[in-house]
Amino acid sequence: MNDDDDPENETTGHVYDGIEEYDNPLPKWWFQMFVITLIFGAIYFALYPALGNWKGFLGWTSIGQWEAEVEKANVKYSETFGQYQDMSIEDIAADPKAMKIGTRLFSNNCAVCHGADGGGNVGFPNLTDKDWLYGGSPAEIEMSITHGRNGAMPPWGDVIGEDGVVAVAEYVLKMSGQEHDASKLEKGEQVYNTTCVACHGADGKGNIMLGAPNLTDSIWLYEGTGEGIRHSVRNGRANVMPAQADKLRADKIRMLTAYVYSLSQE
């Protein structure tokens, strides 16, 4: 028997540029894998959402799986945080074990803005001193973390003109005990009493209800030089502290509050 008589050498009759197309059967292992894949796909489509509005017999959803994992994690970690539930923020802040947890929470959620040591940066408050825009009591810190803060210093450049910007900046320099141009103080005080006093107060001590900073000390959220103050007055400032209530559980926020509180007590 020659090769042409071999059943495995049968062709389909198609010839392309002198090349014949053989009609060989698929390997059994390949065909079996193909059938298994079809069966698996049919079962998968039946059990899980795969086509259109079909929800699958198992009723599985990615949201449901996520919620189940979160619930499992809550049960697991409630034992860790539960022991601090009845303690005051001050007592938690004095607990070394709790502060190790607080350190990790701070590193994961706050350090990117306030720095690993809480020392802050230009535009981001220093959490290690006694100067607080919205108050530094445990309750006030917890409020800031939970609900966030939105600070807005309106731009006054178009309202008071460049002369007014320069004058009020000199007046603020005087309030903070820095060198200033005395010849501009009279106008600067007038501008301050017209545009700034409502938020920063007549004495420049600020207002924690509004997040208006104290202008009489040496602590500045932005640069406290003449040019820095003029820039703030001229162009305004806008700060946002994002709310953490939708990101962290209440027990974690409480632990984080205690850690932030502890930073200013050292």
Image (tube, helix red, strand yellow):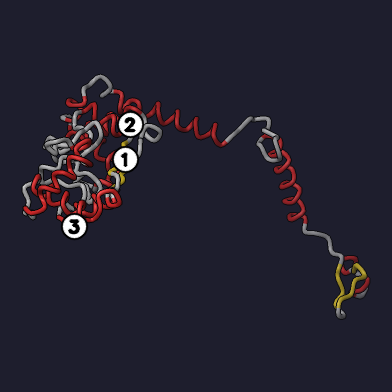
Height in image: 232 above or below 145? below
- Decide if residue 133 is in sight here: no
Q: Nearer the viewer, residue 173 or 79?
A: 173
As drawn, the label of residue 241 is 1
Where is residue 184 shown, x and y percent of the image?
A: 11, 52
Sequence-wise, the earlier of marks 1 and 3 is 3
Q: Amino acid at mark 3?
A: Glu
| Badge nearest the viewer, 2 or 3 | 3
- What residue did someone put label 3 on? 227
Sequence-wise, the earlier of marks 1 and 2 is 2
Residue beneath the point at 30% across and 27% down:
81
Where is residue 97 shown, x and y percent of the image?
A: 21, 32
- Decide if residue 190 is in sight here: yes
Secondary structure under tag 3 reads helix
Furthest-top residue in view? 86
Secondary structure under tag 2 reads helix
